[in-house]
């Protein structure tokens, strides 16, 4: 081996890993030494991967997991603090990061496929926000959740958006005002996660849940997911008007015709995803 080759830096590990299990794409946060904090690069990688998956008809569901003891500690505070030395004391970078992270979270919500979080460890601040942004969540018995920004003088305002759309107001405010972590069982009680499973089984459980949804018509899931989030922001009357329009559109779909026919004929439906 030459001296030059011996001194060549080893390639850096990917910060986001991708694999496919059947119709399910698994995206794994891979910055365990940094507690999978959402750096600028991690946010960009997640957003780009979601865009690619959205256009891939072979993928019918997504699981977001993480390597190491933490699911995600939220924003990378070291990266943010480094920009205090900027002429504007970091204002432009902070705005760029918060907007980029918000856009990525919305990409999870707007993805026309189910997204399941597999939470093996602690999820704090924007990490908790990522869990709340997913459609479904499976948590290890050892997982914990917190929005602890208040402890360092930084209220978790952007995580608040996703959190307050998942759990009742009093419970959301308690998490936001105290910063205290809650257990996986408590997260299930207040609606932040769907299921709590033994440690080490959360990824498999998340994949199985995603596969269960993947058996349905992709067109129906896309239509229904979009409608779910849109109607939640409407008044009761507007929500019913909108939902009636969606149901009518859905009834005209080939898959609804096939599904209803299969139900009447007592056979398994054959989806065309249209």
Image: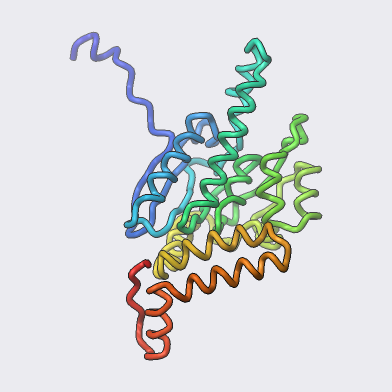
Q: Which residue extends farthest bottom?
A: 265
Decide which of 47, 2 is in the foreground and name it. Answer: 47
Horizontal side of 182 relative to 29 (left or right) equals: right
Q: Quadrant of the N terminus?
A: top left
- Residue, x 67% and y 56% (percent of image)? 166
The one nearer the camera, 158 or 143, is 158
Quadrant that contains the C terminus: bottom left
Colour convention of the picture: rainbow
Image-based side of 263 in relation to 88, left or right: left
Quadrant of res 71: top right
Task: Give coordinates of residue 69: x percent, y percent.
Answer: 54, 42
Res 258 quadrant in image: bottom left
Task: In the displayed orientation, state which residue is furthest to the left.
Answer: 1
Residue, x 59% and y 56% (percent of image)? 141
Instruction: Provide residue 87's location: percent of width, then percent of height.
Output: 65, 10
Please, is residue 174 above or below residue 222 in the view? above
Instruction: Measuring from the top left, give residue 188's x and y in whole percent.
Output: 65, 61
- In the image, 91 versus 258, the foreground residue is 258
From this view, report whether residue 42 is shown above or below residue 270: above
Q: Is residue 68 above or below residue 220?
A: above
Q: Is 25 on the left-hand or right-hand side of 39? A: left
Identify the residue at image location x=54%, y=59%: 226
Residue 207: image location, x then y, percent: 43, 59
What is the number of callouts on the image? 0
Q: Residue at x 62, y 33 (%)?
A: 98
């Amino acid at each position: 081996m030459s001296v030059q080759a011996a001194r060549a830096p080893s390639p850096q590990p990917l910060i986001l890993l991708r694999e496919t299990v059947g119709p399910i794409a698994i995206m794994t946060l891979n910055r365990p030494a940094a507690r999978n904090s959402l750096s600028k690069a991690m946010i960009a990688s997640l957003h780009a991967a979601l865009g690619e998956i959205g256009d891939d008809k072979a993928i019918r569901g997504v699981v977001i997991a993480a390597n190491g003891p933490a699911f995600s500690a939220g924003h990378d505070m070291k990266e943010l603090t480094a920009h205090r030395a900027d002429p504007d004391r970091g204002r432009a970078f902070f705005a760029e990061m918060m907007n980029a992270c918000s856009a990525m979270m919305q990409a999870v919500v707007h993805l026309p496929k189910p997204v399941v979080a597999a939470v093996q460890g602690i999820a704090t601040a924007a990490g908790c926000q990522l869990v709340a942004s997913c459609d479904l969540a499976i948590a290890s018995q050892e997982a914990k959740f917190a929005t602890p920004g208040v402890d360092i003088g930084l209220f978790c305002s952007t995580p608040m958006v996703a959190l307050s759309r998942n759990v009742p107001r009093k419970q959301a405010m308690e998490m936001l005002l105290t910063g205290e972590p809650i257990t996986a069982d408590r997260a299930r009680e207040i609606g932040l996660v769907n299921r709590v499973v033994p440690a080490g089984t959360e990824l498999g459980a998340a994949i199985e849940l995603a596969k269960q949804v993947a058996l349905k018509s992709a067109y129906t899931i896309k239509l229904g997911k979009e409608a779910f989030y849109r109607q939640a922001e409407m008044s009761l009357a507007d929500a019913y008007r909108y939902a009636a329009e969606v149901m009518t559109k859905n009834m005209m779909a080939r898959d609804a015709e096939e599904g209803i026919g299969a139900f009447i004929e007592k056979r398994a439906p054959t989806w065309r995803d249209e």
